Image (tube, rainbow, N blue to C red):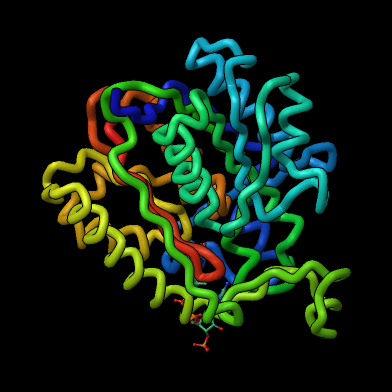
């Protein structure tokens, strides 16, 4: 039998606090109109003091497990994508495993910045296709608000907190059609976030926050995402007209619109959560996917293209028959 992986459940969690562009404009030199016009963001969610990547991951994961109607003890692999783990170790995956009380699984984290969810999904798919796992929990969970410099208007306007999850299960018909992941370590200086205690560079030790040359990142992101669309279509011998939905990483509405244009897709076929969530890094694609599944936009049998781009640079895509 040929093994494929198939999405059997999705979940998401957004913290309660809403932080609007107006509120940010009170502390840094910016405005609602500048932020909205340049990014498409109006507000973002901010985690409470009691919350963490693991606590948010737990809520999203429980929703995905419930939607799948599966016994959590059948999960044999847990992959958490996060750049904002609760601890350096144990991994957030292990913390999530403990919270869910799942005994016979292996859990680990994936660090690929904003592309983390696609990387995690790709690994999960390989495990299932090879027969090494049958049911895999994939989660992206981020508390970006804690690594953002709230005095830097170039970054603090962009990011938000949240968690998204999906459960993949083995099946004999597709499923996940293909995944494609890439990295290029030459671009570290354009987008990075140091861990103060382990950085060798004195300036990075002092900062400890996201540092980004936004406009340069923007240009590479648009070109790279255009290329990954071509790669994904070619690998599946598919025409762009066969794609029903684009579920992009939510970094900037202008980047999303450029990818949609490349696919000749109407923005009506693009799932956009950016306006009220901002960029939730590795959670964004899973949150958007969950939202569109739950509100009935994405239907069983439809073809969905997921894509993301992030620090590293890292980038990737997944083509899914839902
Ligand atoms: O998710 C991981 C990947 N991340 C991304 O993909 C983010 C990609 N980058 C972006 O989304 C955009 O580059 C930003 C939204 C960050 C910035 O937009 P931009 O159109 O690239 O603006 P810019 O950096 O070229 O700056 C244009 C002007 C500058 O002023 P001058 O030099 O023209 O006087 C900035 O100082 O806008 C100024 N500026 C702001 N003004 C008001 C920068 N940030 C702000 C701000 N409010 N928040």
* Residue 294 appearing in the image: no
Looking at the rendering, which quadrant does residue 199 occupy? bottom right
Q: Which residue is at 52% across, 81% downward?
A: 186
Q: Which residue is at 56% across, 30% downward?
A: 137
Query: Is 298 or 317 nearer to us in this picture?
Result: 317
Whole-percent x, y for residue 269 in the image? 24, 42
Q: Which part of the image, by quadrant, shows the N terminus?
A: top left
Above/below status of 54 relative to 218: above
Query: Is 138 or 57 nearer to us in this picture?
Result: 138
Q: Which residue is at 81% across, 44% downward?
A: 90
Q: Which residue is at 44% across, 23% downward?
A: 169
Numbered-mark total: 0
Q: Please state if 181 lies on the left or on the right of 158 as rendered.
A: left
Above/below status of 217 relative to 136: below
Query: Is 112 or 257 nearer to us in this picture?
Result: 112
Whole-percent x, y for residue 232 in the image? 26, 54
């Amino acid at each position: 039998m040929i093994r494929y992986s198939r999405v059997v459940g999705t979940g998401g969690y957004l913290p309660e606090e809403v932080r609007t562009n107006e509120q940010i404009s009170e502390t840094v030199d910016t405005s609602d109109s500048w932020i909205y016009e340049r990014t498409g963001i109006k507000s973002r969610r901010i985690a409470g003091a009691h919350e963490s990547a693991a606590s948010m991951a737990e809520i999203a994961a429980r929703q995905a497990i419930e939607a799948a109607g599966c016994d959590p003890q059948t999960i044999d692999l847990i992959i958490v994508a996060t750049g904002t783990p609760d601890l350096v170790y144990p991994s957030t995956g292990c913390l999530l495993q403990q919270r869910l009380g799942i005994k016979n699984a292996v859990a680990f984290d994936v660090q690929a910045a904003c592309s983390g969810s696609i990387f995690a999904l790709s690994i999960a798919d390989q495990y299932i296709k090879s027969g090494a796992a049958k049911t895999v929990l994939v989660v992206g969970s981020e508390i970006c608000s804690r690594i953002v410099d709230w005095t830097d208007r170039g970054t603090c306007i962009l990011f938000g907190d949240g968690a998204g999850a999906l459960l993949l299960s083995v099946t004999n018909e597709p499923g996940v059609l293909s995944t494609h992941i890439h990295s290029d370590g030459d671009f570290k200086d354009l987008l990075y976030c140091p861990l103060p205690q382990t950085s060798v560079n004195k300036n990075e030790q002092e900062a400890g926050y996201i540092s980004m040359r936004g406009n340069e990142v923007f240009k590479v992101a648009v070109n790279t995402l255009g290329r990954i669309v071509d790669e994904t279509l070619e690998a599946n011998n598919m025409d762009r007209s066969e794609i029903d939905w684009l579920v992009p990483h939510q970094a900037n509405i202008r980047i999303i619109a450029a990818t949609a244009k490349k696919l000749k897709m109407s923005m009506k076929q693009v799932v956009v959560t950016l306006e009220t969530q901002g960029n939730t890094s590795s959670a964004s694609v899973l949150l958007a996917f969950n939202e569109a599944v739950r509100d009935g936009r994405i239907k069983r049998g439809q073809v969905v293209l997921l894509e993301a781009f992030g620090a590293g640079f890292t980038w990737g895509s997944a083509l899914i028959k839902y």
